[in-house]
Amino acid sequence: MSFFKNLKCIDLTSKLIILLSILGLLPFAFGLIDLLINKDNLFFLINIPKYYGAIILTFLGAVYWGIVLKDSVQNYLSEKFKAYIVCWSIFPSILAILNLILRDNLSIIVLATCFIFVQIVDEFIIKYLKLPIWYLRLRRILTILVVIVLIFSYFLIIDD
């Protein structure tokens, strides 16, 4: 709850990022509700948590492109570190596409594991880059919620 108490201290753009991030959970929730209510006759033709999760996982890597592009102007990171960041930034999208290729329901658990893995890497990178603490806290909350939705989705699917 301290995360939300500190929202008074941040600027409008940061608040908008937080709001849109939280609203970004809605497709996960809609997909989970669809699996729960319409298990045998899904409203959506695809497993929304799985496919939307792959998109979001890709986005989490893409954030680092923006960081490196911004640093190209400010030059506070070494070229070697920027190269590592750029290489890391495509890794979540590779994980996401490989996960979409898997047709097995287990791919949802693999996707949840990918979110946890990306979060662990982000914990180190975000602290090293000295990004705002609210961003790290937001990422933690969102990752936990996404992983919970994916796990519930998995158990709803295998329950057939």
Image (cartoon, rainbow, N blue to C red):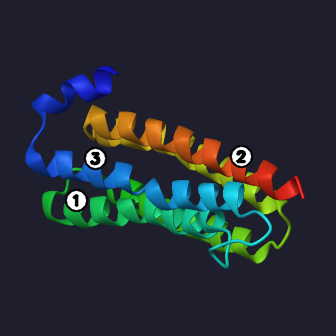
Tell me the CA gap for discs 1 and 2.
37 Å
- Disc 3 crowd rating (10 Å Cα; few below 14, some 14-19, many 20+) is some
Question: The C terminus is located in which quarter?
Answer: bottom right
Residue 39 as seen in the image, left or right of residue 136:
right
Give the mark, 3 or 2, whose residue is nearer the N terminus: 3
Amino acid beneath label 1:
Asp
Provide the secondary structure element on which disc 3 rests. Answer: helix
Q: Which mark is residue 18?
A: 3
Residue 134 as seen in the image, left or right of residue 56:
left
Give the mark, 1 or 2, whose residue is nearer the N terminus: 1
- Tags 1 and 3 in contact by the CB under 8 Å rule? no
Q: Which residue is mark 2?
A: 151
Task: Give x and y (percent) for residue 126.
Answer: 37, 41
Q: Quadrant of residue 75?
A: bottom left
Question: The N terminus is located in which quarter?
Answer: top left
Q: Which mark is residue 87?
A: none
Q: Quadrant of residue 148?
A: top right
| Residue 73 against residue 115 in the figure, above or below | below
Question: Which residue is found at the position 30% from the left and 27% from the top?
Answer: 3
Tell me the CA gap for discs 3 and 2.
24 Å
Provide the secondary structure element on which disc 1 rests. Answer: helix
